[in-house]
Image (cartoon, rainbow, N blue to C red):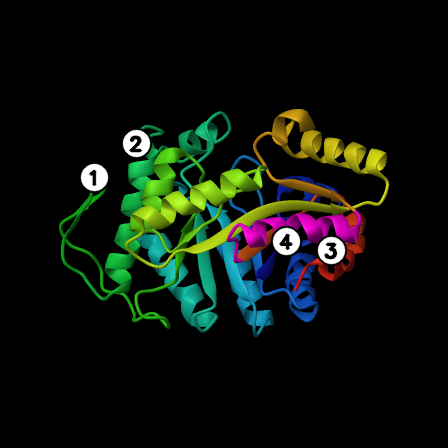
Amino acid sequence: MKFGLVVPTYRSILDAGRTAPEMVAIAVEAERLGFDSVWVGDTLAKAPIDSLTLLGAFAARTERVTIGTAALLPALRDPLLSANAILSLDLLSRGRITLGVGAGFAGRSEPEFAFTRVPWERRRARLDDIVALWRHVWSGKSGPFHGEVLHYDTLPEYAEPHRPGGPPVWLASFTPGALERVGRLYDGWLPYPPDVADYADGLAKIREAAVRPVTPALFATVLIEEDPVRARERLEDYAQRNYGVPLDFVEKIQMQIAGSPEQVADRLREYRDAGAEHVLIRIATQEPAEFDEQLPMVAGALPR
């Protein structure tokens, strides 16, 4: 099983004192600590450092790790311009980029679509079209493209990607419809179900429908804290500061692990046994000093 680190880039961590160059230094440190990948999120709601710009800096300062988005909202960008930006990252990193993508989270993402004047309706079909368009142009095709939502009679010519066909694209979703789409249209699956049995069931459904190889990944929120009462308090604080809702609500949706290094490792092994091959670790803190303290402890707890 591979492990990646999600580097926090949102406004809250900037407000707490983290700088953009320090974010790049975290990616370098993650590579030194043995992580297999480094990832950044993407949103307009919290005004983060731009994900694709930051990945360019990661590409320049790292040598081995995969760099990726967890998860990019492609609808917020012009599809042809984003195809070129991603292709540029592919070439700069020598083929080390992987894209986790999503269509937005109902109840939270609607303002972001409004900011960019993109219709919220048919957002999933739009996402599928954008990914298909990217692959179309990354494969050297400049002829017409007509999807369910996007239509182009002519297209610009793009450079040849480092990896034939361009970077892998993983779908970050766990809806019933997404499971079927992953197997047909995407190269990987990036959910965060709190129940390992649900993960195993979802992966089985994907493999039933798959017409291409699919990488089973997992987005996991992790905190090393030996005291169970304190662990609960710290996760509660993170849920409130990050989402503005109680932990009781968040943990029904997202996979959360807080405990000793052994407890964290055991929980991650459960998902490994259920089929997860690449786990993206998000450390549950908004404070730069706490993040820096947690990072080596989390790295040491990962089951190899």
Instruction: Work out whether residue 218 or residue 89 is closer to the camera in this orientation and state it.
Output: 218
Q: Main secondary structure of the magenta part?
A: helix
Q: Which mark is residue 24?
A: none
What amino acid type should be assigned to the residue bearing mark 1? Answer: Glu
Residue corresponding to mark 3: 298
Instruction: Report the amino acid beneath label 3.
Output: Val
Residue at image mark 2: 122
Q: Residue at x 33, y 30 (%)?
A: 119
Quadrant where the N terminus sits is: bottom right
**Which comes before the other along the chain, label 2 or label 3?**
2
Q: What residue do we see at 35% from left, 35% from top?
A: 177
Query: Is residue 234 shown above or below 29?
Result: above
User: Residue at label 1?
Assistant: 148
User: Is residue 78 shown left or right of residue 221?
Assistant: left
* Quadrant of image for the C terminus: bottom right
Could you say whether the residue bearing mark 1 is in a helix, strand or loop? loop
Distance of label 4 from label 2 (alpha carbons):
37 Å
Q: Quadrant of residue 33?
A: bottom right
Does the image show residue 43?
no
The boundaries of the magenta stretch are: 260-277
**Residue at the spot 57% in from the left edge and 74% down from the top edge:** 63
Residue 253 lies, in percent from the top left, at 56, 32
Q: Is residue 13 magenta?
A: no
Marks 2/1 in contact by CB < 8 Å: the verdict is: yes
